[in-house]
Image (spheres, rainbow, N blue to C red):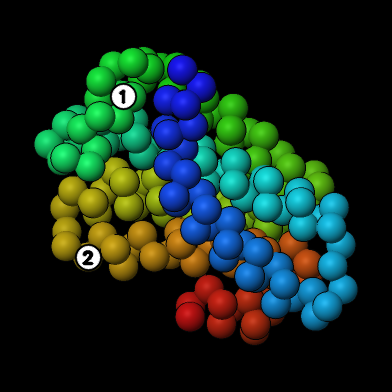
Amino acid sequence: MLKKYLFLTKPGILFGNFVTTLGGYFLATQGSVDFLLLFLTLLATTLVVASGCVVNNGIDQDIDHKMQRTRNRALVKKTISPSIALIFAFALGVLGFSLLWFKVNAYAFLFAAIGFVVYVFFYSLWTKRTTIHQTVVGSLSGASPPVIGYTAVSGQFDVAALIIFIG
């Protein structure tokens, strides 16, 4: 059963965002690594991304049965109820956002919020079903983790953070 909850979080997406958060973090450290801050940033960002992925699974359960790749997901097969998945997503999100706010900084929190809102609302709920340009919109949420990593260290949104975000 634990495996089903893990797969709701989309581990491949988590790993990709973990790596880009790490990249942004190391770009800003310039060789001076605070390992506790690194751990908290990676953990918190992963939890927020996991929350968004679980919400996305809930949103897409009505269309996931149509694709070979997604037809065996827990919400499609009804092995996890949508309400339990939503509670799981909420818990992941609250923990991740709380860590960013209380243990990292407001900039990291802000970019996590931007990434989450773009992924859940603009990508999952709106453009994924209405336009062929959904990947452009989704790329904004994908641009957030390296900025989270960078701002965790720098404590500011500067030109370098902007270049990371729009690059």
Relative to residue 23, is residue 138 drawn left or right? left
Name the residue tied to disc 1.
75
The answer, for residue 105, to whether it is visible in the render is: no
Residue at 67% of width from left, 34% of height from top? 95
Residue at 17% of width from left, 59% of height from top? 131
Q: Position of residue 18 (x, y in %)?
A: 58, 56
Numbered circle sitting on residue 100? none
Name the residue tied to disc 2.
133
Crowd class of label 1 (few under 14; some 14 to 19; many from 20; radius 10 Å):
many
Label 2 sits on what residue type? His
Of 127 and 18, nearer the camera is 18
In terms of secondary structure, where does tag 1 sit?
Answer: helix
In the figure, residue 106 lies in which quadrant?
Answer: bottom right
Q: Nearer the viewer, mark 2 or mark 1?
A: 1
Q: Is residue 91 above or below residue 118?
A: above
Q: How far is disc 2 from disc 1 in space, using C-alphas?
A: 26 Å
Give the mark, 2 or 1, whose residue is nearer the N terminus: 1
The answer, for residue 50, to whether it is visible in the render is: yes
Residue at 46% of width from left, 17% of height from top? 1
In the figure, residue 34 lies in which quadrant?
Answer: bottom right
In the figure, residue 30 lies in which quadrant?
Answer: bottom right
Q: Position of residue 93 (x, y in %)?
A: 58, 36
Label 1 sits on what residue type? Leu
Crowd class of label 2 (few under 14; some 14 to 19; many from 20; radius 10 Å):
few
